[in-house]
Structures are given as C-alpha cells and as structure tokens.
Amino acid sequence: MTDWVQLLIATATALLGALGLAYWAYRAQSDRSALVGLYLLFGIPAVLLLLAGAAVLVRGDRVLGPMLLLIGLGLGLPLLRPFREALARVTPLDPDSAIDMTGLSIVLGLLGLFVGNSLAPMSGDPPELIPSVGIVELLLQAVFLVAIAYIAVGVPYWRDLRAATERLGIVAPDLRTIGLAIAATFACFVVAAIAGLVSQQLDPGLSESLDEVVDQMTAQVQNPIGAIVLGASAGIGEEAIFRGALQLRYGIIVPSLLFMMLHGPQYGFNLALLGLFGVSIILGLLRKHVNTTAAMITHALFNAVQVLALSSMS
C-alpha cells in the first residue's frame, strides 16, 4: 500500500473520529449521561497518564516522565470547573459548555504532547534523513485541517456551512483585507528576524542548523508552484484551526502557544520558537481586528516567501 493511500485512510479515520466526538460533546450540552461519559473519556486517560508519568519520572526517565505528566495534566485540568472558571476570566471560554470543555482538553493535551516532545534531546539525525513534504501531502493536510475546523464549530450538528464559515471568520478578501495582510507579513518577518538575531547571539550556530532542517523539509516544493501550494496549505489549513476555530473560544495566547509548540518537535525547544510565538500573536491580532482571511493571506505569504528564498540560495 502506497504512503499516500495510508495517509488518506488515516485522514478519513481522524475525520470520522472528530465527527463522533463533536456529536458527543453536542449531546453533552443537554444530556447528563453524555456529559458523564465525556468526563470518563478524558478523565480516565488523564489519571492513568499522571500515575504512569510519576512512576517513570521516579525511575529516572527525564524525557518520557514529564511528557506523560504534561499530557495527563492537559487532558485532565479542563475537567475541573474551577480551572475553567479561572480561564474564563481571561478568555471567551464558557465554563458551562461541554463543547468548550472538550475542545480545551484536546488543545491542552496536544500542547502537553508537543512540549514533552520538544523537551526531548534532538535526534541528531543528519538533515538528509528528515522527511520532505510533497504537494499531495500539503493539499491533503489543508483539506483535513479545514474540515476539522468546520467540525469544531458545529458542522453538521449545530451550524450549517454558511453559519460555520461566518463563525470561522472566513470572508471573500477585499482590498482592505489584502492590504492589511501584506503589511502584517512584513511585521511577521521583522519579528522572526529579531528572534533569529537574539537566538543566534545566545546560541551560535542555531540559525544554520534550523535552516538545514527547513531546507530539507521543503526540498520537494522549492519552486514557485511548490511555494504557493505550501504557503496556501499552511495559511488556509492552520489559520482555519488556530485563528478561526480556537481563538474565539480560548483567546489569542492559548492557540498561539499550541501553534508555537506544534513546531517544537521539528526545531527543538529553543529561543527560535519565540519568533513563531510572535508571528502567531500578529496572526491572532489580524483575526481579532480584521478577519481570518487576512490571517490566512499573511501566513501563506510568510511561508511562501521563506521557501522561495531557500530555493534561490540552493
């Protein structure tokens, strides 16, 4: 079976799982038994992971132990009403919503996983062993992320496609949206450059090693068409999730932390990630004051220009 067929099967399975979980959370809004089921769904793994993480940590594993603990905390903390109420003071989260609770458990569980992975020592593999992404994978990734975003905001259960598109902040771009997106792209490059200079001063050689990783990861798309596909894939797919679906429920900071740590396993836990966090804050402000489409355009331009720059240097 070819790799892309396996990828299709995995993608379809994940989408079916997301549809099932969304329906479960929707039922839990009014069905107490479904709500209890959600607590068990996330609570049992959370407790087991916390116990396993503590046991592994006591035995001296400083990598797996913290990772298990972080995932367990991420899954379990949103089940505690005082935690949701505290977070609701600084975010738009509804502490009474089973849907918001479900989403928060997934977001914080993933954040724990990514942080745990990033704390592990880098593998030391030479750049040529790092898998390079292709156009088919990029297109499938974009479709998957957009589908997940629509499911997360209620399609097909409590919103139709039109209402979900409005909730995600996706609109047809006008001149104002495009102009602000282009201006924000320059701001993103400034933030990334400042973070790169700081990290280079504190960790000489980091910039070169990261460039090698990015160069290998994008080797198949270092051409104008590939750069456009990569930029559009990341811009549309990731922004639909992080800014479209998550930000209106969990604010700018929580999705930005997840966005930053999503790249941690690739780049390692280092100061360069602060640049990604700064870029994510800019994208979040675009979503808040303009729309998600503006964030999509900025993200797409930012990534596409980076790939084209790499291709021109190779």
Image (cartoon, rainbow, N blue to C red):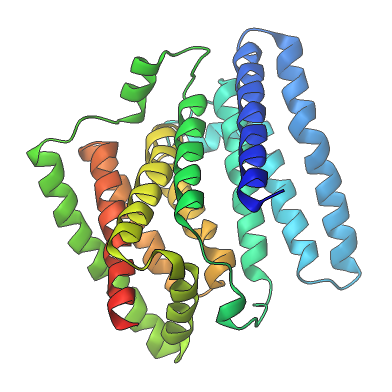
In this rendering, is residue 106 above or below 299? above
Q: Residue furthest top?
A: 30
Q: Nearer the viewer, residue 118 or 94?
A: 118
Answer with left or right where residue 235 lies relative to residue 8. Answer: left
Q: Measuring 83% from the left and 35% from the top, which residue is drawn there? A: 44
Q: Residue furthest bottom?
A: 204
- Residue 54 in percent (x, y) is at 85, 58
Q: Measuring 81% from the left and 40% from the top, which residue is drawn there? A: 45
Answer with left or right where residue 62 lies relative to residue 55. Answer: left
- Tell me where residue 36 sits by quadrant: top right
Which quarter of the rendering shows the C terminus? bottom left
Q: Measuring 51% from the left and 75% from the top, which residue is drawn there? A: 270
- Residue 82 in percent (x, y) is at 62, 33
Q: Nearer the viewer, residue 206 or 77?
A: 206
Q: Is residue 286 visible?
A: yes
Q: Measuring 78% from the left and 72% from the top, which residue is drawn there? A: 62
- Residue 110 in percent (x, y) is at 62, 48
Q: Residue furthest front?
A: 1
Answer with left or right where residue 221 lies relative to residue 107. Answer: left
**How many numbered badges does the structure rendering display?**
0
- Residue 74 in percent (x, y) is at 66, 46
Q: Is residue 94 visible?
A: no
- Tell me where residue 38 sits by quadrant: top right
- Tell me where residue 121 sits by quadrant: bottom right
Q: Nearer the viewer, residue 264 or 219?
A: 219
Q: Nearer the viewer, residue 116 or 169?
A: 169
